[in-house]
Amino acid sequence: MPTFKEINASDIKTSRSVLNQLVDVIQNDISGSNTRRSYQVFVTGGIGPGVTSSLFQTVYDQDFTLQTANSVFDITVGIFSGSATVAGSSTGADSAGKLLFPTNSLMMREKINIYRQFAQNLLGDADNQFSAPFSNPAATDYIDEAVFLNIHRLFARDAIKRGTFAMQFNVTGVLDATTSGSPAYTNLNRTSTSGSAIFTDVGSQLETSYGGAVGNVTLSTSTAVNAGLLFYDQGIVVLDAKKIMSGTQHVSGVINAMSTTGTSVIGSAAGNPNAKFIPDLFVSASIDNIIDHLASCRYQSGSLTALTLQNNTNINSTLVFCRATADEFNYSANPTFTNSDGGIIVIDDPTTERTFSFITTIGLYDANDNLLAVAKLSRPIEKNDEKDLTFRVRLDF
């Protein structure tokens, strides 16, 4: 039978602390084919065998087929509906207002809808447009083509810590030579080895948006170059494709297409010899094609860090101070520790012995004597009439 003592409000204190965890994502995790998972959720019909593509891909910390693999973040792309890219590629709208696009474009409505979804969640209006910097943007600061990194809860936790995000990315793709408009070799699937840059939120001003706290992502060597936004509470990075990559660079390679073969060659003499990464690749290629290029070619392959951040885990603590004065808890209340008359044995000889006990466990009860929590001491603590002890029980949640 335990010994009870009422705990007063003055014995209970609350506190809040923040635990930080460092997250490093290496290059191979992003560029590797077995650590980056695609989902076949989009299928075309009509011309040729059709095109199958994901709407996003997920980066894992190891082979995603293993049960121990953890998903780190999702990567996808989107295009603003009011951008020049959409206006220049659309052929109009149908009677229901749905935008129409020619067959040499792919998944344009899906790219627009992805942009709108992130705008709704982060800006509060699907028709709003992202800009970097977040406040007081110039006309050239609005993001038409966006790359979205959605960091998962396991790694973002309660929020991303301000000033800890950094991403290494190759701005320049492989340079391909051209002869009479035909590329000597393709660069769409070749790993870039130059133009490496680091984008970070270090020194960014903290602002408030519909999606919570937000900061600007800038070029580490020049904070005047605003390349995107970081929504700390949501764990979402919005990058301006025109700022993190040389969009005007010529692009060439095989992409999925609505054709009899299911593919086409972008940047060739037969198919748009002057094609650029932006807007041509973002218009003509599937989402999988674009993500494959960004992940496989722009982050490189190796064991170096490609993306790093620290997260915040908010820990709310209730501290309960359990006090035992000199004349309390000095003998065992164990109902089996009794004498021949059934009374609890306090001491064997009151003339030569002093009462004492060893405290091993503290239980917290509600007003109806229901046990709510149990605290175990690391070792028994002796209690006698000369000791006034206070035990601090900490409940974290």
Image (cartoon, grey):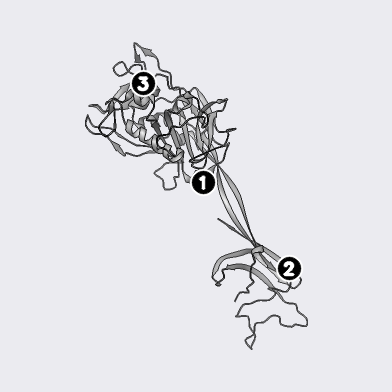
Quadrant location, the N terminus: bottom right
Residue 130 in view (yes/no): yes
- Mark 1 to mark 2 CA distance (whole Å): 41 Å
Mark number, residue 252: 3
Circles 1, 3 touching at the beta carbon (< 8 Å): no
Q: Count neighbours of disc 3 (C-alpha within 10 A) and say few if under 14, some if 14 to 19, many if 20 or more.
A: many
Residue at the far top in the pictured view: 180
Quadrant location, the C terminus: bottom right
- Mark 1 to mark 3 CA distance (whole Å): 40 Å
Q: Which sits in the foreground, 373 or 33?
A: 373
Q: Quadrant of residue 218?
A: top right
- What residue sits right under mark 1 in the picture? 157
Asked if 8 appears above or below 204 in the picture, the reply is below
Query: Where does residue 112 sit, x and y in percent of width and height?
Result: 36, 33
- Mark 3 to mark 2 CA distance (whole Å): 80 Å
At 53% from the left edge and 32% from the top edge, which residue is drawn? Answer: 216
Query: Where does residue 362 sit, x and y in percent of width and height?
Result: 62, 67
At 42% from the left edge and 48% from the top edge, which residue is drawn? Answer: 67
Badge 3 or badge 2: first in the primary sequence: 3
Q: Which amino acid does label 1 sit on?
A: Arg
Asked if 358 appears above or below 197 in the picture, the reply is below
- What residue sits right under mark 2 in the picture? 388
Q: Count neighbours of disc 2 (C-alpha within 10 A) and say few if under 14, some if 14 to 19, many if 20 or more.
A: few
Badge 1 or badge 2: first in the primary sequence: 1
